[in-house]
Amino acid sequence: MAEVVLAEGEGASGLASMVATLLAQNVERSREKFEDFRRLSAEVLIEVADLGQSVTLSFDRDRCTVHSRSTGRPTIALRTDSETFMALGQIRIGPLGLPNYLDAPGRAVLRAMVSGRLRIHGLRHLRTLNRVTRLFSVA
Amino acid sequence: MTFKAYSPEWAQAYKDEINRSAVYKQAAAGWEGSVGLVVLAEPDKNVPEDLGIFMDLWHGEARDVRITSRDEAEKADFVISGPYSRWKQVSKKELDATKGIMLGQLKLRGDFPTIVRYTKASQEMTECTTRVPVEWPDE
């Protein structure tokens, strides 16, 4: 069973609480997402610049700990703004489980990358990035 | 014409504003579910008791918007709660509701994947509140 916990418990930031709840609910309702969750062993940093907030997700098989700050050595780091962050969840998953960057939501994310509103470090960990994208996709 | 904040007349004006919005109609075309807004009391701002707004929203239409008790609003499928002054900021366009949730200034309860899927609809829903002229109890 997948477990998503807040490192700071009741003192977690709004962003950490939101990310943790979204992740837990997404994994709970989809067997494919659950499998992705179980296969992840990575640290993912998300920085939302206009909110001045960061969260680090530490995936370790059946468990993900969500920290309300930047911590550890992230495998992947996303630096973005709140609007683009919400848009990331709209990415649809296409054939072979790959994120679809050709439709409108996907193109919006590509535009954010080109304009610098979304910066991704650790692109060489493409499999991990695709898993994380699938985990947070609500489309 | 201005409406006393959170009066039945304000609720009717808010409902009319939502139903006038082509943006909301399109963005919420697939939405099914009630939304409860909980306004937490701030006695020093002339809001002595918690109150609720219950919104019956269905496929891009506001079927009902009414002022209720906090308990009644909390029975909705999705509940957003926050202190009076935060909601006033939202209505005055000083705070984006989604950012408010991400910052922990507003609390969301419900299915997060659905909320993320309908980000544009929820943004327009709060945008509609900014178009209703309001007489605030602390002004």
Image (cartoon, coloured by chain):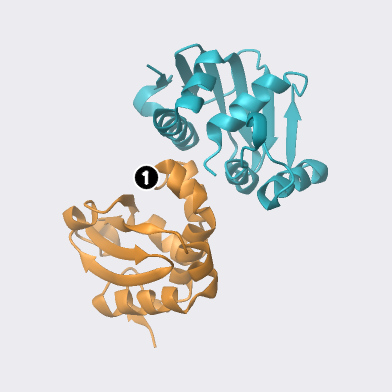
Q: Quadrant of residue B41?
A: bottom left
- A109 horizontally vs A22: left or right: right
Q: Most extreme residue toward the right, as rendered?
A: A114
Tell me where residue B97 appears, x and y as whole percent. Answer: 47, 54
Tell me where residue B6 appears, x and y as whole percent. Answer: 29, 70
Quick one: A62 or A94, which is closer to the camera?
A94
Point 17% across, 53% down: residue: B71
Point 66% across, 49% down: residue: A105
What hue does chain A carry in this figure?
A: cyan
Q: Which residue is mark 1?
A: B107
Numbered circles on residues, count: 1
Q: Please tell me whether residue A21 is drawn above or below residue A69 in the rendered image.
A: below
Q: Quadrant of residue A72?
A: top right
| Chain letter for mark 1 | B
Question: Which quadrant does the N terminus of chain B fall into?
Answer: bottom left
Tell me where residue B26 appears, x and y as whole percent. Answer: 53, 67
Quick one: B44 or B24, which is closer to the camera?
B24
Q: Most extreme residue toward the front, as rendered?
A: A95
The kind of residue on which mark 1 rests is Lys
Q: Most extreme residue toward the bottom, as rendered?
A: B1
Q: Please tell me whether residue A77 is drawn above or below residue B3 in the rendered image.
A: above
Q: Please tell me whether residue A43 is drawn above or below residue A83 in the rendered image.
A: above
Quick one: B90 or A44, which is closer to the camera?
A44
Q: Who's orange, chain-wise?
A: B
Tell me where residue A73 appears, x and y as whole percent. Answer: 65, 13
